[in-house]
Image: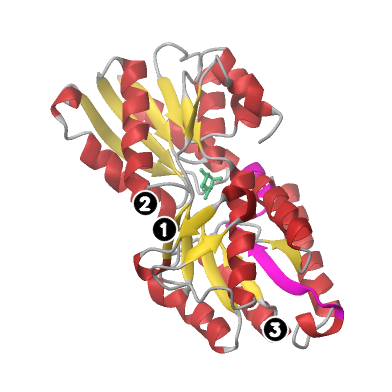
């Protein structure tokens, strides 16, 4: 694990250096390319790598954007703040951030915007004052409620449910979990209870340990919801290693490419996710529209997001992409080669 972390750190430093060696003045001036950084929660996450594929696809279509992928080695606000400080000094044109903390990034992103950099958040949002637009993959309430519905179908609406989340500060997971608690209040879940939320920090080893911790603390556990691609994969492995298939059901937000085996062998009966490629693609179209002045990012505007169509800007710069897909044994193989 240590090795993975240090490789990740080196990669992020290489990326920072790549920019530092490039144009450090007004980025579009020399080569006509606008510089955008796709800043993710942390490196080494297949979900974000798929987002980058979409961002590169959009950049190729637009023709005037250079997108560089960056992230800290661990999912912390501090790691992201450090990178943003460097990017302000380099005067990039846009930073599109999946935030590790809704509020902690605001001072540094305000500083970036004051320096003329267009800042948006996507996937995991920054509070309104700290970005222009926040692009959510889908409706937060829908995602949260759907996770409870998916586990209830697997557990027959019964028993103790544990949640294995990402970090305790993650904007997106916290919003979804809030809606999970709302959903479970409905009468059809009278025999079902969410017993605890644990945090695997979007690190495989910690997510695995936290899942095993839930098994020992709640011997009657019937299900796990893990609304993070790293968490749900680690939880599937833990269920299999402990021989708990059929006793502890699993759902979450997972990548078909990573979860195919566990879906097909029944460890995870069903799960959901949107297309991360589309998410990175859309974030790039939004950034370009802001840089070039096609939009300002205010309510009522409509963003032309290429093959994703028109995306309206809502109150406080909030924009939503589309509905999540649900994957089960009947369709997971079709998507596994895509994301
Ligand atoms: C992880 C990250 C990401 C989230 C997905 C579902 O990869 O936490 O922010 O959107 O899971």
- Mark 3 or mark 1, earlier in chain: 3
Percent x, y for residue 264?
Answer: 58, 14
SS state under label 2 = helix
Q: Nearer the viewer, mark 3 or mark 1?
A: 3
- Residue 74: image quadrant is bottom right
Q: Residue at x 47, y 22 (%)?
A: 270
**Above/below status of 285 relative to 175:** below
**Mark in the foreground, 1 or 2:** 2
**Which residue does the numbered mark 2 point to in the structure image?**
174
For this rendering, which residue is in front, 138 or 205?
A: 138
Residue marked by disc 3: 91
Tag 1 residue: 169
3D distance between C-alphas at marks 1 and 2? 7 Å
Indicate whether 55 appears above or below 334: below
Residue 23 part of the magenta segment: no
For label 2, the crowd category at 10 Å Cα-Cα, with few meaning under 14, some 14 to 19 and many 20 or more, is: some
Q: Position of residue 144 (x, y in %)?
A: 34, 40
């Amino acid at each position: 694990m240590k090795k993975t972390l240090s490789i990740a750190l080196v990669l992020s430093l290489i990326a920072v250096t790549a920019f530092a060696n490039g144009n450090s003045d007004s980025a579009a001036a020399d080569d006509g390319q606008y510089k955008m950084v796709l800043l993710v929660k942390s490196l080494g996450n297949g979900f974000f790598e798929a987002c980058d594929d979409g961002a590169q696809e959009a950049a190729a279509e637009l023709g005037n954007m250079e997108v560089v992928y960056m992230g800290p080695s661990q999912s912390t606000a501090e790691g992201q703040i450090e990178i943003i400080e460097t990017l302000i000094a380099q005067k990039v044109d846009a930073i599109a951030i999946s935030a590790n903390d809704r509020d902690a990034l605001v001072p540094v992103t305000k500083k970036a915007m004051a320096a003329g950099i267009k800042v948006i958040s996507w996937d995991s949002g920054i509070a309104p004052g700290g970005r222009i637009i926040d692009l959510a993959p889908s409706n937060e309430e829908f995602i949260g409620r759907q996770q409870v519905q998916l586990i209830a179908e697997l557990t027959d609406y019964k028993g103790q449910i544990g949640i294995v989340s990402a970090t305790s500060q993650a904007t997106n997971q916290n919003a979804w979990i809030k809606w999970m608690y709302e959903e479970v209040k409905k009468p059809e879940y009278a025999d079902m209870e969410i017993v605890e939320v644990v945090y695997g920090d979007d690190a495989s080893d910690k997510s695995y340990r936290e899942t095993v911790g839930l098994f020992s603390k709640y011997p009657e556990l019937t299900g796990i919801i893990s609304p993070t691609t790293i968490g749900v994969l680690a939880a599937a492995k833990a269920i299999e290693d402990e021989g708990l298939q059929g006793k502890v059901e699993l759902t979450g937000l997972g990548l078909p490419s990573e979860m195919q085996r566990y879906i097909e062998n029944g460890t995870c009966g069903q799960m959901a996710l949107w297309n991360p490629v589309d998410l990175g693609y859309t974030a790039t179209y939004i950034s370009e529209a802001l840089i070039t002045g096609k939009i300002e990012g205010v309510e009522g505007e409509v963003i032309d997001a290429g093959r994703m169509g028109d995306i309206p800007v809502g109150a406080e710069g909030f924009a939503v992409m589309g509905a999540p897909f649900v994957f089960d044994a009947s369709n997971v193989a079709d998507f596994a080669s895509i994301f």
